[in-house]
């Protein structure tokens, strides 16, 4: 019987860093099982074993990815009952949070979202009110569901690797038959940059870029970073809405967040406050962004960023 259950949606050929973080956190809570939606390759199974996973569950239905969140929540509910898990960990993506909410209703479980830390006794830590406060919460129900932000812990294999056992979980037929089905998909163009939600470094631009993200993209490529933006920049059509960081966009928690030409309004702050180091570049010395920045540069981003990019390239050889 497992103490913690980690949900992995479409593991692919190699597990994402954010998934390895979930597995690292789950070990704090005891023996770990994973509920996978998708094929598990030999390399993925080996990695799961290295992170201490004792059981790999897969759904009886092989087409859950063709549906919205409902069937995945039903699968997870069945997986919890099969393993006896008292904690379920998911990523903090919009879909995962919807799955968490549905799972909470199915299991009468406490649901804690936007988690930035978990203790061995199940206490979760959250950063709330645009990062103004840190809070702690603990579910009083028999099962607790956590959606966990990326980049909050360094992935760490288990001291004693495990040999996970494979098993199948029966998904209720009515959970699939009565759900909305995805009619079509369009593949997102590949930029070669890391995913914004789990990038270790983010370079973000706002109204101050005046439509030109070129200097930010060059700096991001030099650092191996993702490119983000404020809502003002995405609404203006300068960059896609999937790059929006903030209260109504993506929440990020990188090791380094570089803000260029962003005023630092509360909506933006809500999406990046938990960044480990914040560097702000803005021409306005009174800009609110300097109140939350660890390092601030009062200057023209079109002069500052190219200089930084050139220096980084020199140091990289």
Image (cartoon, rainbow, N blue to C red):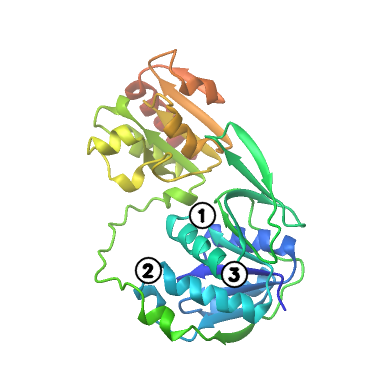
Secondary element at tag 1: loop
Residue 140 rendering spot, x and y as whole percentages: 71, 58
Residue that numbered label 2 is attached to: 68
Name the residue located 50 percent from the left edge and 28 percent from the top edge. Answer: 279
Secondary element at tag 2: loop
Residue that numbered label 3 is attached to: 107
Mark 3 vs mark 2: give the one in front: 3
Q: Which mark is residue 192?
A: none
Residue 303 lies left or right of residue 238; in this view the side is right
Residue 175 lies left or right of residue 8; in this view the side is left
Work out which quarter of the rendered image holds the N terminus and state it: bottom right
| Vertical position of residue 31 compared to residue 19: above or below | below
* Number of residues whose C-alpha sits closer than 10 Å to that of mark 1, classed few (under 14), some (14–19) or many (20 or more): many
Name the residue located 49 percent from the left edge and 75 percent from the top edge. Answer: 74
Q: How far apart are marks 2 and 1 (CA)?
A: 16 Å
Earlier residue among tags 2 and 1: 2
Q: Distance between the residues labelled 3 and 2?
A: 19 Å
Q: How far apart are marks 1 and 3 (CA)?
A: 19 Å
Residue 231 rendering spot, x and y as whole percentages: 33, 36
Residue that numbered label 1 is attached to: 92
Mark 1 vs mark 3: give the one in front: 3
Q: Which of 167 and 86 is in front in this view?
A: 86
Residue 91 rendering spot, x and y as whole percentages: 52, 58
Name the residue located 53 percent from the left edge and 21 percent from the top edge. Answer: 291
Mark 2 vs mark 1: give the one in front: 2
| Vertical position of residue 37 compared to residue 93: above or below | below
């Amino acid at each position: 019987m497992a103490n913690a259950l980690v949900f992995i949606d479409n593991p692919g050929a190699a597990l994402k860093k954010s998934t390895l973080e979930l597995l690292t956190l789950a070990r704090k809570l005891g023996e770990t099982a994973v509920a996978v939606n998708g094929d598990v390759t030999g390399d993925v199974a080996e990695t799961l074993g290295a992170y201490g996973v004792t059981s790999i569950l897969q759904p009886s239905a092989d087409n859950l990815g063709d549906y919205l969140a409902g069937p995945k929540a039903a699968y997870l509910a069945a997986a919890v009952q099969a393993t006896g898990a008292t904690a379920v960990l998911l990523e903090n993506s919009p879909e995962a949070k919807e799955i968490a909410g549905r799972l909470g209703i199915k299991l009468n479980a406490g649901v804690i979202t936007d988690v930035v830390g978990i203790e061995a006794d199940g206490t979760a830590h959250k950063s709330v009110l645009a990062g103004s406060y840190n809070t702690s919460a603990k579910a009083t129900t028999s099962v607790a569901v956590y959606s966990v932000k990326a980049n909050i812990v360094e992935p760490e294999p288990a001291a004693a690797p495990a040999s996970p056992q494979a098993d199948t979980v029966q998904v209720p037929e009515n959970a699939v038959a009565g759900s909305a089905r995805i009619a079509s998909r369009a593949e997102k163009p590949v930029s070669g940059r890391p995913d914004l939600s789990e990038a270790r470094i983010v370079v973000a631009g706002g109204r101050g870029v005046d439509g030109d993200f070129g200097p930010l993209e060059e700096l991001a490529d030099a650092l191996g970073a993702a490119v983000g933006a404020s809502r003002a920049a995405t609404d203006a059509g300068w960059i896609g809405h999937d790059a929006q960081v903030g209260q109504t966009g993506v929440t990020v928690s990188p090791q380094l967040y570089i803000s260029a030409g962003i005023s630092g309004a509360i909506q933006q702050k809500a999406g990046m406050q938990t960044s480990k180091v914040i560097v702000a570049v803005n021409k306005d010395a009174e800009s609110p962004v300097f109140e939350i920045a660890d390092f601030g540069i009062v200057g023209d981003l079109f002069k500052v960023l190219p200089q930084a990019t050139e220096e980084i390239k020199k140091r990289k050889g």
